[in-house]
Image: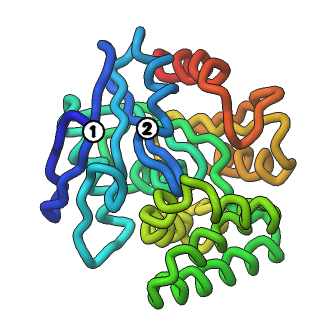
Amino acid sequence: MEKRTLSRDGTRIAYESTGRGPAVVLVSGAMSTGAAVAPLAAELSDRFEVTVYDRRGRGASGDTAPFAVEREVEDLAALIEAVGGEASLYGVSSGGALVLRAAASGLPVARVAVYEVPYAMDDAAARAAAEYTGRLAEALGQGRRGDAVELFLRLTGLGEEMIRGARQSPMWAGMESLAPSLAYDDAAMGDSRVPRSELASVTAPLLALAGGASPEWMREAARAIAEAAPRGTYRTLEGQSHVVEPGVLAPVLADFFAN
């Protein structure tokens, strides 16, 4: 990350901007830095000034205790100010939950797009999310970063054999370094349900996306997001899963942001 801006609490937030045009800020999900959305930024940079950043507690950005979701919203406020005072936002997975919180807070957001925010769509999923929250807090509180990463990987549906393999991989140390930020993503998800009352206050046009190859509940969550927002629209990207291809996603976002 080449640039820095200061959030309201003094935390340094590292970011990088590319391209020219209306400002767009991309927000990554759990267990990732701004590098995760850099390929999408490259696809959009011919029409927009696209900013990617390391969320607090990750990569080249700092962190300041105590954490609250409001601090991450303030990080986005600082970035929007740095890129001209207004921007469209895109967030993937739990990063999308943060984007929705930011849009509902009244930040100067032109347009909002999210991809597969994993909100719980039934009671069983909500109970599983609540159990994850408790066990994650316990693991992190005891300094068991590896166990915290395992909890997250299980939540995403990864099998035990694959988790054991991940523990032996060269990437594991980097994953453990990001483990404390799992609590930040979990906080952004709120009570795990679609935040309909908050979404009702989002005045900007909103696009909720999901992949046609993803589980049906992902599409249900995206539809619910769109239905709860006054200017919400839902769209399925056929053939796409939770790891969406930048070349497929970028044209859809470009048309939406340029409108």
Residue 127 lies in quadrant: bottom right
Cα distance, mark 1 to mark 2? 10 Å
Q: Secondary structure at mark 1?
A: strand
* Residue, far top: 46
Task: Name the foreground residue: 81 vs 184.
Answer: 184
The kind of residue tagged 1 is Tyr
Looking at the image, which residue is at 26% across and 53% down?
Answer: 61
Residue under pointer 1: 15
Looking at the image, which residue is at 54% across and 69% down?
Answer: 186
Q: Secondary structure at mark 2?
A: helix
Percent of width and height locating residue 235: 72, 31
- Residue 199 showing in the rendered view: no
Looking at the image, which residue is at 40% across and 16% down?
Answer: 45
The kind of residue tagged 2 is Ala
- 83 sits left or right of 259 in the view: left
Residue 194 lies in quadrant: bottom right
- 156 sits left or right of 19 in the view: right
| Mark 1 or mark 2, earlier in chain | 1
Task: Name the foreground residue: 20 vs 155.
Answer: 155
- 136 sits left or right of 2 in the view: right
Count the marks: 2
